[in-house]
Structure formats: structure tokens, C-alpha cells
Image (cartoon, rainbow, N blue to C red):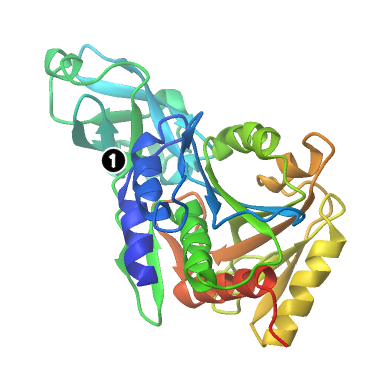
Amino acid sequence: MDIKDIVFRLCSAYGASGDENNAAETALDILHGFCTDAGIVNGNVIGNFGIHQEGLPLLVLDAHIDQIGMIVTEITDDGFIKVANLGGIDRRLLPAQQVIVHGKKDIKGVICSVPPHLLKGGSSKVPEFSEISVDTGLSRGELEEIISAGDTITFDSPCRSLLNDRISGGALDDRCGIAVILLALDMLQGKKLKYNVSVIFSVQEELGERGAKIGAYRLNPDIAIAIDVSFAFAEGENRKKCGLLGRGAMIGISPCLSREVSDILISVAKEAEIPYQLEVMNGLTSTNADRYSESREGAKTCTLSVPLRNMHTPVEVIDLSDVRNMASLLAEFIAEQEH
């Protein structure tokens, strides 16, 4: 499996929270190669890997399919599109960004930026969303033929290669997590498994883990691992609160996670000599893991995260070696070891 190609393909499909169908169909097409029964249920992409064996615990691998974005709230008389946020967008970076508006057809636009010459004192405050406008070059009448209130907007930021196995793009959170799961399934083909494995690519994580909540209730796993991203250190950040690019999966440790599963993942990584790092949290993880740990009777839950720089921006950065190593760790965790 060409993991870079998979990540680029997943990231090229738009899927802001609440409008994930395009990205879901793309992921479903790839997942069908591993889970023949895969389908879309209430927006979530769900599939069972292999033939489930009676008596084995059910392990669910979850990664969210949605990305941050914006929603159209109105079209002004002057032909500008007004917006609100879908998920946690940093308003500091919005002026002058290139975007795609997903209406009856996709149209490209830019977010308006007031020139510094026209700003008092030559500086600007962080704009409120009520002050954000998208310019497409079309009039109000032309826009109303294509765009409606409620349509979504995503950053026009396709993936591109950087140096040293690193890539950048605007939807790596959490399409790279989906790629981890797909690569792990590829590694597990033909192997005897310790668990029955189900996969879910869940919707609306950025709006409060809504897809995972209904997915967790439907699947009712014994064990769940949320595959997501977490903070990778960059200049100016606190090293103690960040992982490092290229140092492997970040294994979650938290009072709301299963220490048993965390310790098994650590042991597996050490035994297989797979690089890993720890992510210690003192409460909720703010990932889909929080939903699995409290659904029904609760599942033994852990997080595995890909270190990612510039989270929730159009220029997120990951190291593909972390994707490969995390997939290897998952595969080692799931496979029955031969003696």
C-alpha cells in the first residue's frame, strides 16, 4: 500500500463536519478492499474486518472522517458570502485564505483581507466570524443560483510533499488516522487475530464526537482505540505538552482511559521495537475515546495519536513514518503472535 497516495486521496475529498458524504464515499471505496460488508450508517463508515469468531472480544478502531470548515449563513447584496465556523478554527489565520464553497457545484473563493494601509495604526485585531466574508467574484444573483445557506466551505489546501517524509495539508486531522487504520488492515491480511475487529470512520467529531457517540452505541465494543492526531512540537510551544514528529505513535494515558490497554500497547511497542511516545492527559481526551469509554457499560478505551503540527489550519504537518509505525503497532497489537 502506498501510504502517501492513500493520505493524499483521503485529504482531497472535502468533508466539513455535518457534510462528510464526499469524504465518506472516498474512504468507503478504499475500506471495501478489507471489509466487504462496509457501508455508511447514519453518516458513519462502518465495516467488519474478516470473519468474526465466536468468543473473541470485539475491538473497534475509530478515526473521524470530518474536518474543520465553515458554513454559509447569508449572501450579501454586494455578493459576499457570510460564514460561521464548523469546529475550532483559529480566527487569526482566516484573512486572505483560499477556500472552496461546496454548493450545487464547487466554486473557489478567497476570504477578504483589509490592506494594512487602510487599518488604523497599520495593525488589525483578530476578526470575529461576523466580520469574515468570502469573495468569489460572483454577484448575489449569480451566487444564489449555486449557493444556499447551510452549504459548507473548506480550505483550498491540498496535500503537498515536504522534505524528510513529511507532508502538509488542510485535512490531515484526521484523514491520516484513517490511513493508519487502512494500512494496519493491509498488514493484518491473512493473519490470525486476537480480536474480532470492526472499523468506523465517524462523523462530526469536531462538533462534539457526535458520530462516535452513536457508533459506540451501535457497535458496543469490548475494546476501542481512537486513532487521532495530537500536538507535535514546533518553535514557541511547550515541549512538555507536545509530541515530536518522527518519534512514533503517541500512546494515551489518562484517568478516563484504560491503563490496561495503554500498558499492553506500550509492551507491544517495546517487544516489536516500534518507536512510540506517551501522551499523558489529566482528564478527558477531547477525542472519540471519551464516547466509547462511557457508552452503554463502557469499553476499555485508549488513544493512539499521530503527532501533527499546526493543528486546525490549512498547513497541518505530519511525518509519514509516524503513520507507518502506528499502523505497525496496531497490527502487532491485534495479530495473534506465532510461537
* Label 1 crowd bin: few (<14), some (14–19), many (20+), radius 10 Å: many
Query: Residue at 30% across / 51% down in the picture?
Result: 12
Q: Nearer the viewer, residue 40 or 308?
A: 40
Q: Quadrant of residue 105?
A: top left
Q: Is residue 253 above or below residue 200?
A: below
Q: Nearer the viewer, residue 313 or 268?
A: 268
Give the residue pinned by disc 1: 99
Query: Residue at 68% across / 38% down in the picture?
Result: 216
Q: Quadrant of residue 73?
A: top left
Question: In the displayed structure, does residue 223 sit left or right of residue 297?
Answer: left
Residue 25, image x, y percentages: 35, 42
Look at the numbered disc 1 and give the secondary structure of its residue. Answer: strand
* Residue 243 in sight here: no
Quadrant for the N terminus, please.
bottom left
Residue 21, image x, y percentages: 38, 35
Residue 127, image x, y percentages: 45, 33
Quadrant for the C terminus, please.
bottom right
Amino acid type at mark 1: Val
Question: In the displayed structure, does residue 318 sit left or right of residue 302?
Answer: left
The mark tally for this picture is: 1
Residue 310, image x, y percentages: 50, 58
Query: Residue at 42% across / 53% down in the picture?
Result: 31
Q: Quadrant of residue 107?
A: top left
Q: Is residue 156 above or below residue 16?
A: below
Q: Nearer the viewer, residue 242 or 251?
A: 251
Question: In the displayed structure, does residue 216 sit left or right of residue 281?
Answer: left
* Residue 287 in sight here: yes
Query: Residue at 62% across / 38% down in the picture?
Result: 212
Q: Nearer the viewer, residue 113 or 289?
A: 289
